[in-house]
Amino acid sequence: MAQWVTIWRAAQLLGVPRATLQQRVRAGEIELADGLVSTEALLRLYPQAQLEAGGLLERVTRIRDEAFGRRVRERLLPSQEVLAQRLFRQGQELADTQRHLQRYHALVLELRDRLAQLACDSPDPRLPELQRQLNDGLARALATEPVDVLDVMDDVLKVVSAEVTLRPSGHQFTVEGHDTLLQAGMRAGLKLNYGCGNGSCGMCKVRITSGQVVRTMPTDYALSENEKAQGYVLACAHTAASAELTIETLEAAGPADIPPQQLVTTVRALRPLGADTLLLHLQTPRSHRLRFLAGQWVMLGLAQGEGVRARHPIASCPCDDRNLHFYVPRDAADPVAARLFAGAVKVGDAVTVWGPDGEFVLADETLPLVFAACDTGFAPVQSLIEHALSLDAAPSIALFWLATRPDGHFLANQTRAWSDSFDHFESTLSTSDDPARGAREMAAAMRADLFDIDCAFYIAGPGGFVDALHGELAAAGVPAAQLHAEVTP
Ligand code: FES
């Protein structure tokens, strides 16, 4: 009999991007019932899963290097305590199911005996017919059916990674390894509410409406008895103890929901990425994190004077909110860049961060995404791409990166790594000594295969580049709501 799983779980079982399955749902190739897809339908579309599962079944007795077994082994397993709790609950479910089955079986046998007696005592011809029907049904139910391999794989995954559903949004994510609910949600690109990340502010409170959680660290913030009775827990200090969990929580809808913050960070690394580009890596204290959305900016203030401040886009992913990366271009007019390039800032120095701000964030959409960057305009674009990859909701992601100076493609390796890891990611690197001309050439390259389909465009770089590309895309008929642009240093 077919089992039903969520799209999230289906993607994990088959080892395909969630966006690919969602695309097949939109194309009508996969039918959803209450948001769930049947394992039967999945096996029809992905018959190779049957073969891969051979690895799983073998693995039960002898670990083999088959695809699914490898995917399970590559996961970071939860702690022994969490694993034990999930196994215990799965065992409980199994025991309940077995008990029910035994009772149904006993009831059916009792009915069969009673029918046999009635058939002997009564000439009613319907009784032998009923007997036959019952015996045939019993034979069918007891016959050995082929194993639903996806169902078996699902059972294994339920132990190693729990599935969480958020209410009221319906967003879903899985909790892997030692992650807390908050970390797992952020890794999945969700905009969860939180503050300190270490159990002291209470801002990450969520209500568990079904499933069980287990605390992973002591906390200073004390929930009231009333809150505890209602099922509230701190998402930054708990993980899933059951295979499925539903929690009630509010998520940020956009930049307006992110509070302004100020924190003092430490320079963890400062190294050249090219002759005119520096990587500045700041780390927040353990007790404070910067909550921001991918694509946003902060004001950086050096400890060397009141006026040594400059606004820069964050290049890193919000899922790692303690480690903030910036790609700082050489610019004598920028007091922070000037001090950094002059060697006046060292590892271990303090840098104050104010923010975040900026509206250049991913819109809530499932269109193919096209990112266009020029030089260090790659910084916010990188943050957005990492966010989009975490969300796994875009059917395809294309990056066009223009360099107008010798070190303009200062992280070309990163784009190759994305291309190698994600089938739905493509990048095109180009060069030009003029940002506006480079933008027009980029638009011509995009025209070949992107203008005809509905895409959302995110453009970042110097003003000349942004204006020229924005103009070309608007002239080509891209709706204004699908054009997002940001001028960067
Ligand atoms: S984020 Fe502060 S208590 Fe969880």
Image (spheres, grey):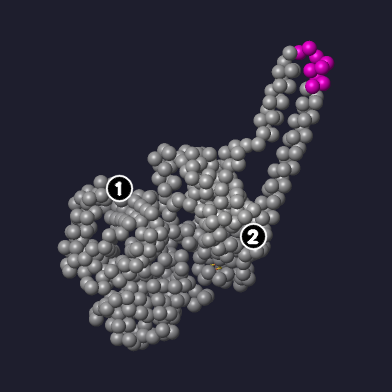
* Disc 2: CA contacts within 10 A as few (<14), some (14-19) or many (>=20): many
Circle 1 packing at 10 Å, graded few (<14), some (14-19), many (20+), is few
The N terminus, quarter of image: top right
Pick whichever, 240 or 261, lies toward us.
240
Mark 1 belongs to which amino acid? Asp
Q: Which residue is mark 2?
A: 83
Estimate the spatial distance between the alpha carbons at disc 1 and disc 2, rounded to whole Å.
Answer: 44 Å
Identify residue type, mark 2: Leu
Quadrant of the rendering where the C terminus is positioned: bottom left
* Residue sitting at x 70%, y 50%: 92
Tell me if 205 is positioned left or right of 31 in this view. Answer: right
Residue range highlighted in magenta? 116-124
Check if residue 118 falls in the magenta segment.
yes
Mark in front: 1 vs 2: 2
Q: Which corner quadrant of the image does residue 387 belong to?
A: bottom left
Element at badge 2? helix
* Magenta span main SS: helix
Q: Which residue is mark 1?
A: 454
Residue 38 lies in the magenta stretch: no
Residue at position x 40%, y 76% in the image: 281
Tell me the SS state at disc 1.
loop
Assign ligand 1 to one image quadrant. bottom right
* Viewer-side residue, 66 vs 257: 66
Is 341 or 255 nearer to us in this picture?
341
Q: Is 123 situated above or below 106?
A: above
- Where residue 269 sits: x, y (%)? 40, 79
Question: Is 248 situated above or below 194?
Answer: above
Q: Judge whether 71 appears above or below 32 on screen.
A: below
Q: Residue at x 67, y 58 (%)?
A: 85
